[in-house]
Image: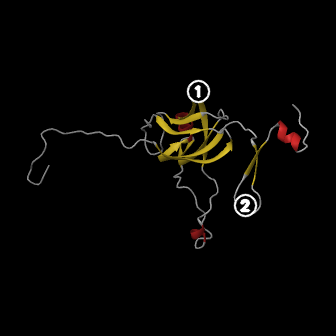
Amino acid sequence: MTKSGAGLREPVRHTFTTTRPKVTYSRFVNWLSPGTPLIQVTFNQPATKRSVERSLTMETAQRRKVSIVAYPDDMPRTLPYWMSLTNEKEQPGVDDKFRQVNDDTARRVWIIEPVKELPLDESIQLRVMPGLVSSEGSEKGMEARTIVRFDTYPHFKFLGIRCTPKGERRAVDIPLNFRTCQSIGWKTSV
């Protein structure tokens, strides 16, 4: 009702849904092996460990799904050089927003890795599916998309040796094959 007495004839009810949990950022932290990446995934609000492990999967080019396992991002970090001069005792961390949700842990930042090594020399998609659970509300995430596409490393091959003569700017590639080994006196077995 306004000051002049004007108002609605009937009550009006309006409902809305607040922001649902979703992936906002991802980056490769490291590789544990040629087929095992460590990926940092950031969410717009704390997401539970169980829902992250259920909603995120890695998918091969042949559409085989590989489950992931999630860990808190507690990796040690160093300050940039220019900051370490003034903040020697400050230890950088992650804006994690840790929360306990029933018997599960919710965080804004998780490190994920596949439960088994991915196939080598193959294109992989990290995908998110609906079902992320947040500590900030009861509405589950609805995202269904590819977060990032990447290729695993190829199978190892020893191609040869590259030498750079001292004081020169050129490199000499020495392919390693049967004749090369014989010419330098190495014993080879075929």
Viewer-proximal residue among 12 and 97: 97
Q: Furthest-bottom residue in view?
A: 86
Label 1 with label 2: CB-CB less than 8 Å: no
Q: Quadrant of residue 69?
A: top right
Residue 168: % across, % down: 72, 61
* Secondary structure type for disc 1: loop
Residue 16 picture location, percent across and down: 31, 40
- Closest to the camera, between mark 1 and mark 2, is 2
Above or below for 88 versus 47 = below
- Of pointers 1 and 2, the one earlier in the residue sequence: 1
* Image quadrant where one finds the C terminus: top right
Residue drawn where x is 12% and y is 39% of the image:
9
Marking on residue 38: none
Task: Give the amino acid type for the residue marked by disc 2 in the picture.
Answer: Glu
Which class describes the residues within 10 Å of circle 2: few (<14), some (14-19), or many (20+)? few
Most foreground residue, 14 or 88: 88
Q: How much space separates mark 1 and mark 2, taking CA atoms?
A: 49 Å
Name which residue type carries label 1: Arg
Residue beneath the point at 86% across and 41% down:
181
Question: Image check: 138 left or right of 7?
Answer: right
Residue at x 42%, y 38% (from the top left corner): 139
Q: Nearer the viewer, residue 129 or 121?
A: 121
- x%, y% of residue 108? 51, 48
Q: Which residue is mark 2?
A: 168
In the rendered structure, the answer to whether residue 55 lies left or right of residue 169 reads: left
Residue at the image position 59 percent from the left and 45 percent from the top? 39
Residue 151 position by quadrant: top right
Apparent side of residue 16 relative to residue 81 in the rendered image (left or right): left
Residue at numbered disc 1: 64
Q: Is residue 85 left or right of residue 146?
A: right
Q: Residues within 10 Å of mark 1 (few under 14, many from 20)?
A: few
Give x and y (percent) for residue 59: 56, 31
